[in-house]
Amino acid sequence: MTSTLGTPVFSDSPARDLVCRGCGTHFPLAAQHACFECFGPLEVGYDAAALASVTREQIERGPKNIWRYAGLLPTGADPASRVTLNPGFTPLVRADALAATVGLRAPLYVKDDSANPTHSFKDRVVSVALTAARALGFERYACASTGNLANSVAAHAARVGAPSVVFIPFDLEQGKVVTTAVYGGDLVAVEGSYDDVNRLCSELTETDEFEKTAFVNVNVRPFYAEGSKTLGFEVAEQLGWRIPAQVVIPMASGELLTKIDKAFTELVETGLVEAPADGWKVFGAQSAGCNPIAVALHGDTDVITPVKPTGIAKSLNIGDPAAGIYALEAVRRTGGWMDYADDDEIRDAIRLLARTTGIFAETAGGVTVAVLQKLVDAGRLDPDAETVVFNTGEGLKTLDAVAEQVGPTYRVRPSLRAVREAGLLD
Amino acid sequence: MTSTLGTPVFSDSPARDLVCRGCGTHFPLAAQHACFECFGPLEVGYDAAALASVTREQIERGPKNIWRYAGLLPTGADPASRVTLNPGFTPLVRADALAATVGLRAPLYVKDDSANPTHSFKDRVVSVALTAARALGFERYACASTGNLANSVAAHAARVGAPSVVFIPFDLEQGKVVTTAVYGGDLVAVEGSYDDVNRLCSELTETDEFEKTAFVNVNVRPFYAEGSKTLGFEVAEQLGWRIPAQVVIPMASGELLTKIDKAFTELVETGLVEAPADGWKVFGAQSAGCNPIAVALHGDTDVITPVKPTGIAKSLNIGDPAAGIYALEAVRRTGGWMDYADDDEIRDAIRLLARTTGIFAETAGGVTVAVLQKLVDAGRLDPDAETVVFNTGEGLKTLDAVAEQVGPTYRVRPSLRAVREAGLLD
C-alpha cells in the first residue's frame, strides 16, 4: 500500500519517482514497494540532469561516509534530515598475499564493510531507508531480520531517540539477540521461521496501529535498496575514480549485486567515471546451502526455484531471493558468473582471508572468498584483471563458524624451560 | 635490555630520545623500556622545534586515520614504513540524550574507538609499536594479552605478512581465543595467570631466540604508549581544534589517561591549539574489582597497593598498574578526580550508553559511563562544562556481560491475532 501520510519532501533530492522493475510503470515517491499494475518490485528513478550535475569535487569535499554521495541518493542531502550512524567509506584493502594464494596476478582488493558502525553493510541501507522514512512522516522504525539488520535498525533508532520494533525468529542465537536487545527498543520473538516473521511484518504494515511504522525492508524497501549503491561509488572513488574490471559480491536477495552494478552504471552515465573500454564483469557468490540464483544461472534459466536454506552462512540464507532475476540479468549482461561454496570451504576461506589480510569476516565474507577461489580455478575470472571482493560483515558476529577450527598452537607451563621443551625456541 | 640490532632510522621523526619518567636520564631511541639508572619507565622525548613545525593544514591534508599525526609521533612518517591496519579518526559522537540522563547541561561527546579495525583502541598503540619495531629491525611481533591486544597484534602481523606469537592465559574465553587464532600466527596458551604470562614474556625478550621479536607492550613499550596520544589529538581536531574542559578515561595501567593528557599538552605547546583559559580536567575510571589507582587518590597517597583483579571489566584488570603514579599526577595537576563502578553499575551503563547513543560498548566503556554518572552525582564534574568520555572497545567482545540482562520484550505466535493479544497493537 502507499502511505497515507502527507506529501514527502524530496525537493532537494535527485530522485524523481518510483519505477516498476517489471512493467516500467511510474509512481510518485512514497512508501510503496510493489507495483499496482503487475506486483513487480519498485526502484527509485532519478532525474538524469540532477545526477549529472554532481561533480567529483562536490563529493570529495563531503564527509568520509555514505553522505558524500547524497547527490546520488534519494534522500539525506540536508545533514539535519539524516537518521544515521554515518556508515561508509570503509577500507578498500589491497590484498597481495590473498591474490597470490588464489592465483590472481593483477591487483586484488577487499572492500571491508565490517568497519561500519554496527559492523555490516546493513548500516548503509538502514541509514538511507530511515532517513527516507522520517521524510515520509514515519515515527517508528522496524524490520524483520535474523541478525545484522536487526542490530543496525535498533542502533539507528537509539541514536536518534526514536522507538523501534524489531521482529526476529524466536530461536535466534543468544548473541544475535543481545546485540539488538541492548539498544532498548522493542524486540519481538516470533514463534516461527524467518519466512513467518517476514509475512507477519507485511501484514502489520497494513494495520492502523503500524501506520506510522517504517519496516526498512518492506514498505520503504525502494529507498533501503538504494543505500547499497554507496558500496559501488566508494570502490570507484577509492580506486581513483575507476571501475574495477571484476567484482565478486555475496548474494542473499541478490539486491546488493544489482545495486553495485547500478552504481557503476550511474557513475558512467553521470560522467563521474570514464566508461572502462572493456566494461566490468559482475560475479555472484552464494553458499551451497542456499544457492537458488547460482543454480538458475548454471541451468541457463530465468526460473529461480526457491530452496529451504541450510548451512552456516545465515546472513545470506534467503531461499526465495526477491532480486534474483535482476542479479541474473546483471551477471549475464556483464559477462560474469556465479558459484557457491559449502560450509567447509566457507570456514577455510574465512581463515585464508584473515591470515592473508588481517580481516576477520563473518560467514558471508567466507562465501565470497571461497567463490573467488573457485572462479579463478574455473577460469571464469581473468587472473590478469583488477578484482574487488566485498566483505559485508564482521567475524565477531559468527564466531561459532570457525571456533572448532582454530585455537592455541602451543600450551606451556609459565617457564622458560617449558617454552624450550615445547619447541617454541627452535 | 637495549636491542643489539643496528641503529634505527628515525631520521624523519620528531622523536629525539627516550627519557626516564623517574629520574629524567636520557637514552638513545632503541628497544629499551626501563631506565638503567633507576629502573623507571622510559618515555619518548621529542625535538620541540620539530613538533612546533607541524601545522593544522598538514594534518588536515593527511589520511583520515592516526597517521595524519605522524609529525607528532615517533615513527611512521613514510607510509611505506608502516605496519598498520590504519586505525583512528574514529567517530566523536554527540550524546545529548546521555547528557540529559546523567545530568550534564553542556555538550557531551563519546569518542568511540570500537570503530577501529579490530574494534578497540589497541590498534592505535599496536600500529605505532610495530612500525617502530620494524624500523628497529625486529622481524616477529608478539605480546602478552588477555584479549584486545592479542587480537590487534595478530591482525597487524597478518596484514603485513609477518610472523606473530601471542601469549595468553590458558583459561581465556573461547571467543577471545578465536578472534586471535583465526589470523594464523602462533598462539601460546600459558598455564598461569596474566601476571605469569607477562613475566614469561619479559624473560623471553632476554633469550637469543627472541632477539628479533618485538613484544609490543614490553621491549618497545615507549613507542607503543605514544600511539594513545592520537586519541587526544583526534578529539581536539574533531572539536574544531579545541581541548574539551573535561575528559573521562578508563584506566588499566593508567597509561591511556596520561597519554591523552600528554597529547593535549603537546597540542598547546606546539601552538596547534590555543590553551584553554581554564585548562582541562582529567578524570579516571576503574572498576570496583580493580581500583588501585582510584583508591590511592581517594586515600590521598602516592602508594598504589596492587590488587588481585576481579569482576567483568577484564580488559581493565591490571592489578599492579605501571603508569598509575603518572595517572595520579595528571588527575591532581588538572583538578580532576577518579572513581570506580561495580559490575551491576557497569552492566547498567553499557545499556544506558547503547539506548541513548546507539553505541554498544565492551565492559570498559560501561565502566567509563558508570563513573561519568558518579562524578556528576558527586559534583566532581561541572555539569555546565563540555565533556568527552572515551569508549575503548566493542560490545561484541564482551557479550556475556549483558546477555542475562537483555532479551526479547515480546514473544508471539506468527499471527496478527497473537500480536494483538500480546499488546503490541495497543
Image: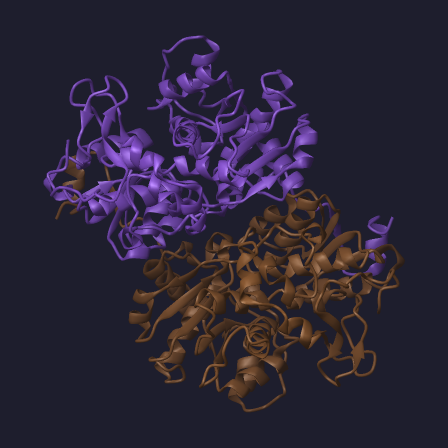
Chain colours: A purple, B brown
Instruction: Pick the quarter of the image with the N terminus of chain A.
Output: top left
Q: Is residue A218 left or right of residue B149?
A: left
Q: Image point 43% across, 13% down: which residue?
A: A296
Q: Which residue is drawn at 57% across and 78% down?
A: B265
| Left or right for A113, reference B8 | left
Which sits in the foreground, A95 or B99?
Answer: A95
Q: Can residue B338 be seen in this view?
A: yes
Q: Is residue A138 above or below residue B326?
A: above
Residue A120 as seen in the image, left or right of residue B205: left
Q: In this view, does B121 lie to the left or right of A271?
A: right
Percent coordinates x, y for residue A290 in the rendering:
44, 23
Give residue B8's quadrant in the image. Answer: bottom right
In this rendering, the count of numbered labels is 0
B184, above or below A301, in the image: below
Query: At x 29% / y 51%, what residue is drawn?
Result: A78
Residue in the foreground of this view, choosing between A89 and B157: A89
- Residue lying furthest bottom: B300
Horizontal and vertical percent position of residue A87: 42, 48
Determine if residue B191 is in view.
no
In percent of the image, x 49 and y 66: which residue is there? B237
Specify the quadrant of the image occupied by residue A125: top left
Residue B182 in the image: x percent, y percent?
63, 43
Q: Where is residue A112 in the image (x, y as percent from the top left)?
A: 52, 41
